[in-house]
Amino acid sequence: MKSMTFQCFMAALLIGIGLGAMPILAQAAEQETLIPGRPEITTRTRIIAPEGTPRAAAVLFVGGNGDLSAMKNNFLLRIRETLAQAGLLIAVPDAPSDRAGRTNLQGNFRASEQHGQDIQGVVQYLKTQADVPVFVIGTSRGSTSAANAAARLGPGLIAGAALTSSVTKEGARGQISIYQTAVKEIRVPAFVLWHEQDGCSETPPAQAGALAKALAASPKVTAKTLTGGTAPRSGPCEALSPHGFLGIEDQASAAILAWIDEVLAARAAR
């Protein structure tokens, strides 16, 4: 993938500011901003800044079709404020402007170069807000987006990739699996997280080991499985079930934050 130059990105970012992108670090409330990615394409992104100086940043990728308005119960949306309170600058991208409200992130778009370019814009935007390591975190189909970003953008822009409840089997609903990204080319630390009782046929917990093994180029892969929670209030592939860590959000967010701390400590020790 051809990376946009920083100068070109800044020029595009100035255009984006005219569309609503504004510096946000001084404000803790969630805001929306339009971030330029591919030429003439913007991605509406929710931003949450922590109090004080961020120690890291994270791009969160929801599952489903990627439409944030339709994914209100998504696991990562439920824990986004917890992550911000832990000192992370959070970005939650919606579908890009040429797909929003139509195809969104359906089909093979999550594994595409175009998606990688759009997320590069989000990552570089975060870098203009705070020069800190940026992590990508995905859940369910969102893990495919996170893996795509980590593989395409590499260690130069991405500090680590957390893949939760990842889609490892193509399903009848037509979604692609995480293996249709260049997962074997991810060269940043990776974290694989599952719920032991995840009953979704496309995200079987038994595949955690296989996914960890596929991340062969990663300098360090950490895998963890959680258990417990509350009774499901949705279907097995939806958010209010073990697939979405229902009732153990605190444990799941703590596991992600502990992994981020380990990666940050290793970077500081270099």
Image (cartoon, grey):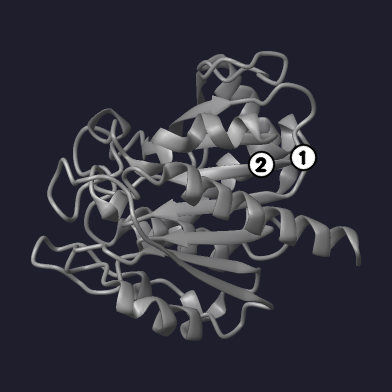
Mark 2 crowd level (few <14, some 14–19, many ≥20, 10 Å Cα):
many
In percent of width and height, residue 218 lies at: 62, 77
Q: Quadrant of the N terminus?
A: bottom right
Label 1 and label 2: CA atoms lie apart by 7 Å
Q: Residue at x 49, y 86 (%)?
A: 213
Q: Quadrant of residue 152?
A: bottom right
User: Looking at the picture, which amino acid does disc 1 mark?
Assistant: Arg
Q: Is residue 160 left or right of residue 151?
A: right
User: Looking at the picture, which amino acid does disc 2 mark?
Assistant: Ala
- Residue 57, numbered label: 2
**Residue 234 vs residue 156, the one in the foreground:** 234
Q: Is residue 239 visible?
A: yes
Relative to 86, does residue 112 appear above or below in the rendering? below
Mark 1 crowd level (few <14, some 14–19, many ≥20, 10 Å Cα):
some
In percent of width and height, residue 250 lies at: 48, 42
Q: Quadrant of residue 177?
A: bottom left
Question: Badges 1 and 2: C-beta atoms under 8 Å apart?
Answer: no
In percent of width and height, residue 7 lies at: 74, 41
Query: What secondary structure is found at the residue carrying circle 2?
Result: strand
- Per the image, the residue denoted by label 1 is 55
Q: Residue at x 49, y 55 (%)?
A: 116
- Residue 43, numbered label: none
Q: Residue at x 25, y 48 (%)?
A: 64
Q: Quadrant of the C terminus?
A: bottom right
Relative to 264, does residue 90 appear above or below in the rendering? above
In percent of width and height, residue 6 lies at: 73, 44
